[in-house]
C-alpha cells in the first residue's frame, strides 16, 4: 500500500481530497503581513470560492503578497508517519522549473530513505502546476485502488505528465511583468491594446507564451479551442479549470467545451494562491491530457 501526496499548488478541492484520501502539504502566503494557509480541508466548494474571491480582490486592491515554499523539514514531518506505518509514498510536485519545492522534497526523500531503507518514496515532477498535478494524483489513487503496482503507476504517470497540458490566460499583464515573464513595457502596451496572451507549460516545465489574443472573450474561446482540438479520449478524462476569482468565465469555458465534446468530469476551482499570485486575478487556466504538449490541434476539423 502507498499514500499519495501533493503540495497545495495541486489545487484539488477539499471535497475531492477527502473523497480520494490524498495528503496535502499546504503552502502558506502572507497578505499584508497576515498569514493564510492556502489549503483548508474543512471548506465546502462555496467556501473555497469565497475565500478565493476575497484573496484575489485584496490582490486587485494592491495588497502586499508574500509566498513561501514547502521546505525540506515540512516534507520530512509529513512523510515520516506514513513510512513509520509501513507504507510507501508517491508525491506529485509542482514543476521544479517553476518552484524549489521539488528539490526540497528530493532532499527529504534522500534523508528518509536512509532511515527507512525498506520503504519507497517516488517523486513525480508534473512539469506543470495547479490541477495538472492534482489530476495526476487522482489518477494515481484510481490506479492504486484497481490493484496496479506502485512502480508501474509511477512509470505511467511520469509519461502522462508530458501529455498533461496546462493553458491559461490572464486578466492584467502587470502580474506577469512583476515575475519577469514579460517586460513592464510589454505589459503596459498590452493592457492598453487589450492583448490577452495564452500561456502554457512546455515539455520542460517552464511557463511560456503560446499566442496572443485581442480581447477577453477571444482568449477564453481560444482556451476552449485548445482543449477541444487537442484532448485525447475526453470521455475518460477529468478536465481541470482553475480561476482566480473569474467564476463566471470559468463556467463559460466549461459550458462551451460541453457543447463540443463529452467529458468524464470537470474540476472547477479557485486558483491556488501561491502560484495564482504570480499570474494575477482573473486568470483562467485549463488542464487536460493530449498526445503531447505541442498543441498542434490534431482533432481540429
Image: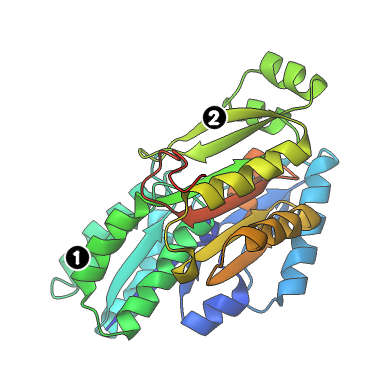
In the depicted structure, whether residue 153 falls above or below residue 208 = below
* Residue at the right extreme, as displayed: 61
User: Residue visible at 55% across and 52% down?
Assistant: 228
- Find residue 141 and report its image quarter: bottom left
- In the image, 32 versus 265, the foreground residue is 265
- Helix, strand or loop for disc 1: helix
Specify whether residue 97 is in view.
yes
| CB under 8 Å between discs 1 and 2 | no
In the depicted structure, whether residue 68 falls above or below residue 140 = above
Which circle's residue, 1 or 2, is located before the other in the chain? 1
Instruction: Report x, y in % for residue 11.
Output: 57, 61
Residue 162: image tag: none
- Find residue 206 and report its image quarter: top left
* Residue at the front extreme, as displayed: 301
- Helix, strand or loop for disc 2: strand
* Residue at the top extreme, as displayed: 185
User: Residue visible at 39% across and 61% down?
Assistant: 92
Q: Residues within 10 Å of mark 1 (few under 14, many from 20)?
A: some
User: Residue visible at 77% across and 32% down?
Assistant: 215
**Count the marks: how many?**
2
Residue underneath mark 2: 209
Residue underneath mark 1: 113
| Rendered-image quadrant of the N terminus | bottom left
User: Relative to residue 276, is residue 188 drawn left or right?
Assistant: right
Instruction: Report x, y in % for residue 93.
Output: 40, 55
Select label 1 or label 2 by which is in front: 2
Instruction: Report x, y in % for residue 196.
Output: 70, 31
In the depicted structure, whether residue 157 falls above or below residue 194 = below
Amino acid at each position: 500500500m502507498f499514500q499519495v501526496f501533493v503540495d497545495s499548488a495541486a489545487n484539488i478541492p477539499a471535497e475531492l481530497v477527502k473523497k480520494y484520501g490524498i495528503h496535502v502539504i499546504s503552502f502558506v502566503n502572507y497578505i499584508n503581513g497576515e498569514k493564510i494557509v492556502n489549503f483548508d480541508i474543512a471548506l465546502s466548494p462555496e467556501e473555497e470560492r469565497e475565500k478565493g474571491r476575497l484573496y484575489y480582490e485584496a490582490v486587485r486592491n494592491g495588497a502586499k503578497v508574500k509566498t513561501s515554499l514547502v521546505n525540506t523539514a515540512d516534507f520530512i514531518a509529513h512523510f515520516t508517519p506514513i513510512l513509520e506505518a509501513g507504507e510507501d509514498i508517491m508525491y506529485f510536485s509542482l514543476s521544479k522549473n517553476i518552484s524549489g519545492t521539488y528539490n526540497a522534497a528530493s532532499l527529504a526523500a534522500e534523508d528518509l530513505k536512509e532511515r527507512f531503507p525498506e520503504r519507497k518514496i517516488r517523486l513525480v515532477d508534473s512539469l506543470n502546476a495547479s490541477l495538472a498535478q492534482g489530476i495526476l494524483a487522482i489518477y494515481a489513487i484510481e490506479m492504486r485502488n484497481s490493484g496496479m503496482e506502485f512502480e508501474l503507476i509511477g512509470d505511467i504517470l511520469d509519461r502522462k505528465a508530458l501529455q498533461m497540458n496546462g493553458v491559461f490566460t490572464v486578466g492584467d499583464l502587470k502580474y506577469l511583468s512583476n515575475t519577469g515573464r514579460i517586460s513592464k513595457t510589454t505589459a503596459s502596451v498590452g493592457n492598453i491594446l487589450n492583448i490577452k496572451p495564452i500561456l502554457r507549460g512546455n515539455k520542460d516545465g517552464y511557463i511560456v507564451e503560446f499566442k496572443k489574443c485581442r480581447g477577453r472573450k477571444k482568449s477564453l474561446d481560444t482556451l476552449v479551442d485548445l482543449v477541444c482540438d487537442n484532448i485525447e479520449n475526453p470521455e475518460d478524462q477529468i478536465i481541470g479549470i482553475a480561476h482566480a476569482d473569474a467564476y463566471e468565465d470559468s463556467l463559460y469555458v466549461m459550458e462551451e467545451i460541453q457543447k463540443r465534446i463529452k467529458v468524464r468530469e470537470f474540476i472547477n476551482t479557485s486558483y491556488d494562491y501561491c502560484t495564482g499570485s504570480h499570474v494575477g486575478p482573473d486568470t483562467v487556466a485549463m488542464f487536460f491530457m493530449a498526445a503531447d504538449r505541442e498543441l498542434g490541434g490534431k482533432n481540429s476539423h
